[in-house]
Amino acid sequence: MTANRGQIGAEAVNGLLGAHSLDTFSFGVPDLDKAEEFHRAFGLVTRERGGALELRTEGNDHVWARLTEGPKKALSYLSFGIYEEDLERFKRHLKSNGVLETDAPPGLESNGIWLRDFEGTLVELKVAAKSSPDQKSHGVMNSSPAGIAGAPKRSAAGLVMPSRMSHILLFTSDVDRAVDFYTRVLGLGLSDRAGSNIAFLHGRHGSDHHMVAFVRSHAPGIHHTSWDVPSVHHVGLGAMCMADRGFSQGWGVGRHVLGSNYFHYVRDPWGSYAEYSCDMDFIPKNIDWSAADHDDEDAFYVWGPKPPADFGVNHEA
């Protein structure tokens, strides 16, 4: 393994200029009714607004994603949250890096900064409250005392309701260029990588091991979204609940190496995945995290079933 800290602009290093959260994202799907059925079964709260389907989590009014209807599944934009005092600094930072501002998507009200990454994906930097966690979300494992049954009856197990979005994994045609852009321009930190195959990025104001990650493909796209649940029990229960509702294709239960989280992935109607995740590593803002370049066998999972043959296929392309 070799240390690799990525590339971050001088202003970002000295003043911690960087996006603090992946605030929301948007993608198109061919059928909003199917999308609503899938995400409601997964345990998310959905609401139609202005022709789009908004995804929330139970008890939290934050909009994690907006889905629109279109000819095929496709990522529309990523929106990152920044602190108000950093807005003008970011404008200067983008200009000094030769990044041009562009217009917001038609019909979308926004007072943020819009730009395009090296593949043309729309990216917004907007003033927003920090939605990434400020501390580690510990995986809870309650053990019952001797003489008392610990597991609930299956009929009383209930639905799994994630508490928040954890991260998104995106396909990219060039992992190295993705790391360069999102660290140098947006001020994210490189957490870990496996050569030019996959890389994980965190928010340097404190976040999970990764809020966004990139895996090599021949075109941009969404591989999966990930949602935080409190325990391995909820990861497994979520898998069962989804299978009971007709969404049995996926991968898990298992444990990742990079990020250390327990997981189960459920395949959506368009070939990408939603992940139940718990107990991910956390990178505080006051730690100088040393990113490493890992061998492929040490970058995927510690234990779990063999992944599906098409797990890495970019169906958007």
Image: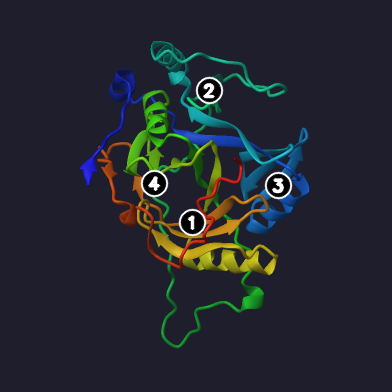
The colour scheme is rainbow
Q: Are marks 3 and 1 in contact (CB under 8 Å)?
A: no
| Amino acid found under the numbered disc labelled 2 | Arg
Which residue is under mark 4?
A: 135
| Residue at 63% in and 65% down | 248
Image location (x, y in percent) of residue 10: 29, 19
Q: Mark 1 Cα within 10 Å, few/some/many (few <14, many 20+)?
A: many
- Which image quarter holds the C terminus? top right
Element carrying mark 4:
loop
| Residue at 44% in and 17% down | 90
| Amino acid found under the numbered disc labelled 4 | Gln
- Lower sequence index among marks 3 and 1: 3
Which residue is under mark 1?
A: 277
Q: Are marks 4 and 3 in contact (CB under 8 Å)?
A: no
Using the numbered discs, state the Cα–Cα distance from disc 4 to disc 2 in whole angstroms.
31 Å
Question: Residue 116 has which mark?
Answer: 2
Residue at the outermost left position: 2
Element carrying mark 2:
strand
Using the numbered discs, state the Cα–Cα distance from disc 4 to disc 3 in whole angstroms.
27 Å
Using the numbered discs, state the Cα–Cα distance from disc 3 to disc 2 in whole angstroms.
28 Å
Which residue is under mark 3?
A: 46
